[in-house]
Amino acid sequence: MAASTAVGSFPSPYEVETPPGCEGWEDMYPYYGRFDEDRRETDERRFWFWNSMHFPVPMPAFDAICIDTAYQALGSWQNRVFAVPPAMGIDWRCINGYIYISGNPVLDPDKIAERAGHFQKRAGYYYENWNELYGKWRTKMEALIAELDELRVPELGEYEPDEVAFGDQETSYCAVLEAYRRALRLADLMWQHHFEFLLLGYGAYMTFAEHCKANLPDIPDQHIAQMVAGLDVLLFKPDAELRRLARLAIDTGVDAAFVEGRSPEEIDAALAESAAGRAWLAELEKVKDPWFHMATGDGLYHTYGSWLDDPRIPYASLIGHIAALNAGEDIERPSDHIAAERERLAAEYGALLGDDARKGFEELLALSRTVFPYVEEHKFICDYWFLTSWWNKIREFGDLLVAHGFLEERDDIFQLSRLEVYSALDELLLTWATGGQPRGPKYWPPIVARRRELLARLADWTPPPAVGAVPEAVLDPALIMLWGVTTQRVHAWARHQEGGSELTGTAASPGVVEGVARVVKTVGEIGDVREGEILVCSITSPAWAPIFSKIQAAVTDIGGVMSHAAIVCREYALPAVVGTGRATSQIKTGQRIRVDGTAGTVAILE
Amino acid sequence: MSAAGRTLRLVELRSGHSGSFGGKSSTLGELMAAGIPVPPGFAVSTDAFRAFVAEAGLDGMIAAELERMAPGDVDSVGAASHAISQAMRFAPVPEAVRDEVAERYAELAEECGVAEPPVAVRSSALGEDSQDATFAGQQETYLWVRGADHVCDAVRDCWVSLYSPPAMTYRARLRSGEGEPAMGVAVQLMVDAEVSGVMFTCNPVSGDPSMVAVNASWGLGLAVVGGEVTPDDYLVSKVTKEIVREHVHAKDVQYVPDAGGRGAVRVSVAEERRAIACLDRTALDALVDVAGRVERYFGSHQDVEWVIARGSELPESLFVVQSRPVTALPRSGGKPTATSAMALVMNAFGAGEPKG
């Protein structure tokens, strides 16, 4: 991409300063993840944007696996399997703990033509056989999650178990390292599966959306989504189960246990006192696998747990549902109405089009409906179910290192890179075997402490939305489809680089609202959100459901109208502006802002 | 039809009358036939105009002025226009036409139960309101006219407007060689508009056929049509009736009936009403409903003038006062030529057929 200064500029990645007291942050990340002098010539001329959609806060060393393995998988499918003609994969670099990414374009027309041949053949095969291939995918993912559940982290006792002495079992050194390697491999495989359908799924949906907008320029995005969206969506299943349990609680007369303000433990204790309550708890247990694998946040960090890890969110929903039911409200998703409306919209919009446009419309709608289950379901299966379980598996290795003094607490493991963990385990097993004195207990804790301090300090630093050159045009389909990073968006970032009191983004959900901003940078801060505030965050998530009933509008740094986040925002009928690039850095909690979800602007009023 | 046949009730008109009564009047008749609420009234034919010119003996004078006029010369056109207009203003409306208009006006008075009902008198030119050309400069409107004599005067003023400089220039440019122009006139019961405006049965800016675009302001329609206020601006989905876009602007002025009972005057809008939306959900629903009916009836996108009457309830208070086909819709450029889903998806990934 050629550089252009006409539309403003971004800072050079080499001129961004390290915040005071954060020296040495680079040591948390691999050598290839920095803006180093060796590549200055090329890196400085490239366009890099902060991937705040997936990495809104500074990256813990271990969590960087979600960059490496994710981008190897995206690159493999996009570049080496499907050979998307104009774009290879994504490169990443880290600045002060924040992750910047840049696409690798294909510029040679002959190469693009060659890749187009591959793409048509391979992607065409996938589209043609989608349902069959996606059926296999579900099986693969379920097998992967089962394998993760079964993976045992061996303990290190005083002696090797009998099975080593009397059987063929391998020694603990081999067994622990093998378990760790398998854990890493399972993550590699999850990401491989994750990206198998992602680009093609989003691509089909986006082509439908573009086709609608070319022929019906003012069609609200929500109508496009409504025409495509599945009726039996996996992501809504967990809440559907909670509604069922709420009804069950009322029907069996145990609803009095669900009192606002009670903790999940207190509610469980109250239920355990009666037979009906115990029956209800047994029913709850059946629901937990898999539906309580719903994540409490939408992110690729170890800090995002599931409802199993933090049952306060589902219990709060249960209390809300039961109160609503007792007040005579209807809490069901009106699925008959949704189904009828989906068909009515499709028929009426189709009828407004000319013959050629209607043919494309109908075929693309059918294709989008075919691919959409994947788009909706992979999030629950990969990002929520697998990933929250996987972080917990890694915590078991943390326990092992804590047990032998290498770490002070289990979550310290996430302050080491995945290769450093390997190294620590290696030394632990070596010295456990030899009876020698390990260096780890002296070596790792200060590193962990320093990194925790670094992450806390870096969290206060505000990353620029982009660094490097301003591209004349964004042509990479992956950047456009997955991140909503379009030419227009990037140029708006560049123009607003100097600051100003108005932010522009994508109008994601209509309406105009004025109110007090609440900037939420991590999922842990969700509890701070007060009734009637305007949520300002990097990206909203369906898993944040409980706060959507409190807020009156949402503003995000990044994201397009395609993200599930935007769709859910519209489901709550909240004005929303997404993809502002810098809302969390420009807006401070407590400021009055005006969100115009119709025009896509956010004004800071004071 | 009355003896001379130079007037008809609007409700009797159909598109076939456009040659004898002009486009506006015949369209109003069609709208009534479609069951669209249109204020009642009557139309004056182009024959009445011809009779006027003939009886006053203006044929020769007009021909001479046109002969002398240099169409490209502003001063020359102005001089011809002035001479013809002056002559027409002092010429009497033929007795027979006066009687017919008075008779129709009396009928209208009886129909609405008001002694001297206020009416709007508008020109209804031949070829006007056609889908092929937006006919500039011949659209005179006289509002809140009362009494048969005043109606006749307003009818004559409409005829005079046929020789305004822009109208003459326009004809000279587009219709040279055709016979002499003629003009019909529509006389319609005045609606005391609380709100009025214009709507398109598509978005005229983007060309989106699923939208109704509404402009609205306080008072009579003059302020919106004449561009004297920035109207409230709505974009409403035909499919879901959702308000997709809503811009409320400060509407400083409005036209209201003159306190003396004749004519419309421009007044300031009360401070507290300027910045508030002049349409609500109910009004927009009624408008979108009517837009759909008008569009379906004519089978093409329409540009509709409407008013909401003071003192009654929606939907009964909504009236259409004019409709014409939308011309010059934008064609969204650069539309992909591919129509199969797979070809479109391939394009999105940059794997379409090579260009050129």
Image (cartoon, rainbow, N blue to C red):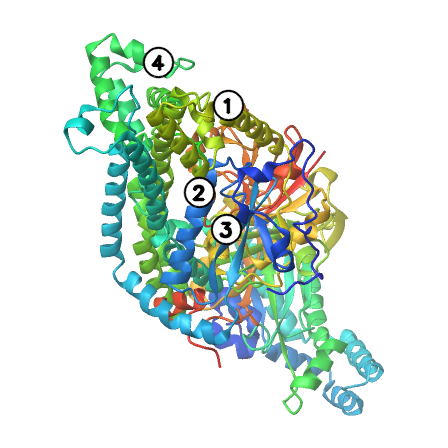
Q: Secondary structure at mark 4?
A: helix
Who is closer to the viewer here, A156 or A486? A156
Instruction: Return the mark for residue A66.
Output: 2
Amino acid at pointer 1: Lys
- Mark 4 vs 3, N-terminal side: 4
Who is closer to the viewer here, A580 or B168? A580
Q: According to the image, label 3 marks what residue?
A: A483
Amino acid at pointer 4: Glu
Q: According to the image, label 4 marks what residue?
A: A265
> Which chain's residue wears label 1?
A
Q: Secondary structure at mark 2?
A: helix
> Which chain's residue wears label 4?
A
- Mark 1 vs 3, N-terminal side: 1
**Disc 1, disc 3: CB below 8 Å?**
no
Quarter-of-image position of residue B222: bottom right
Residue B279 in view = yes
Instruction: Return the mark for residue A442.
Output: 1
> Which chain's residue wears label 2?
A
Q: Nearer the viewer, mark 4 or mark 2?
A: 2
Q: Is residue B125 above or below residue A89?
A: below
Amino acid at pointer 2: Cys
Amino acid at pointer 3: Trp
Answer left or right for A241 relative to B306.
left
